[in-house]
Structure formats: structure tokens, C-alpha cells
Amino acid sequence: VRPNNYSTFYDDHRQNWSIMFESEKAAVDFSKQVCIAKCNSSPALDSVLCQDLLLGEGQGVEGGDSLEVAYTGWLFQNNGLGQVFDSNVNKDKLLRLKLGSGKVIKGWEEGMLGMKKGGRRFLIIPPAWAYGVQGVAGRVPPDSTLVFEVEVRRVKLAKECSGSDGLSVSSRDSPAPSPVPSSDGFSSD
């Protein structure tokens, strides 16, 4: 996925191709279908399939970073999107999570690495990386493959500190130790 409704890919002969779509929606829908096709063509899904829909801006998130995300989750049924089992898209509260804390399913921890603020990603998560043989009573049957569309709305880097000019600085680029941020540390943008 590239800016301005472009996508690029390689074919079996390592030839590079580009496609330009008429709209962002068309590009996003195509990218979702590519990910579903990858899932349907793999003999056994044993890891998370990730497909960027929109790239976002800034630094990619790593373990320890805090995020606020909007998401929708579907059951993967009949080789495609089944029923929605969870979503916070039309709700007031975003989901807050800290990557690597183990508070969300393993497929999210893995599938969201490298996402950027404003980025959207499509994840297809096998049962072992989701709720496994237990499922979730009344919502997710046992051994379910799950599909999520996640959008990172806010990011707080794990090693964020305030520079002398008041701007936010990431200590990944600086050897200085980072103090504990004041307030909740999320920037107003």
C-alpha cells in the first residue's frame, strides 16, 4: 500500500507491479481481498496475516508503546468475513492497550507491531493466536480464525520525554534517560 491510492506488488517472477485505484475505499477493499485470498490459499494458517490498508505517519510502534485503537472483529467463515463479534468503531471509547503487556490476544500483539499513528491494518488471526480451543462464550466459537480491522488513533511511545522546547522527543533517538511523563502522556493531536 502506498499513498494516493496506489498499491505495489511482486508477481511469481519477482516483477514489480503498481495499481492506482479511483478511491481510497477501492484501494482498501482490494487490499482486504488480497489478504483473504492469501489466507484461503495457504494450506494451514499458523501465523498472523497482516495487510496494511493505510500507512499512517510517524514512527512504527514497538513493544511497550501505548496505543488507542478503533477496531472491528469478524469471525472468518466460509472463506471470508462472517459475522461481526466485536467493534468499538461507533462508540465513544477507544481501546487503550500497551503492546507487549499480554492484555490482548497474541495475534494483536504481533499484528500491530510497526503500525503508525493514523494507520489501518487488516489482520487474519489463527485460533492459536486468538482464543484457541476455549473461544469466548456466546461470541467466539472454539477454534475460530478471527479477522480484525484496526486503526491506530493515538500513540504514546514507551520512551517519550519532554525536550527543553516543550516538544515531545523520543528517547530512541537520544541517549538521555526519559522521565515519567506527566498526565496520561497522550498528545492532543
Image (spheres, helix red, strand yellow):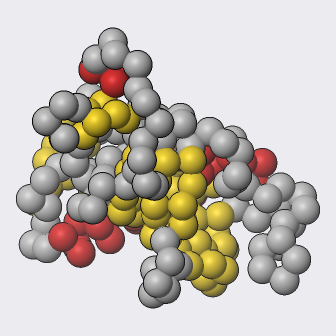
Judged left or right of residue 72, residue 128 is right
Asked which quadrant contains residue 183, the reply is bottom left
Asked which quadrant contains residue 159, the reply is top left
Judged left or right of residue 26, residue 114 is right
Q: Is residue 76 visible?
A: yes
Vertical arrangement, residue 64 with respect to residue 172, above or below: below
Q: Position of residue 75 (x, y in %)?
A: 66, 73
Vertical arrangement, residue 146 with respect to residue 8, above or below: below
Give the total of numbered labels: 0
Q: Is residue 126 visible?
A: no
Residue at 42 percent of width and 47 percent of height: 182
Which residue of the protein is positioned furthest toward the bottom in this rendering?
90
Vertical arrangement, residue 1 with respect to residue 28, above or below: above
Judged left or right of residue 147, residue 188 is left
Q: Position of residue 126 (x, y in %)?
A: 69, 52
Q: Position of residue 48 (x, y in %)?
A: 59, 46
Residue at 36 percent of width and 62 percent of height: 153
Q: Which quadrant does the C terminus fall into? A: bottom left
Vertical arrangement, residue 85 with respect to residue 169, above or below: below
**Of 91 and 183, which appears nearest the observer?**
183
**Of 59 and 113, which appears nearest the observer?**
59
**Of 95 and 156, which appears nearest the observer?**
156
Residue at 18 percent of width and 31 percent of height: 164
Q: Position of residue 69 (x, y in %)?
A: 46, 63
Residue at 14 percent of width and 61 percent of height: 5
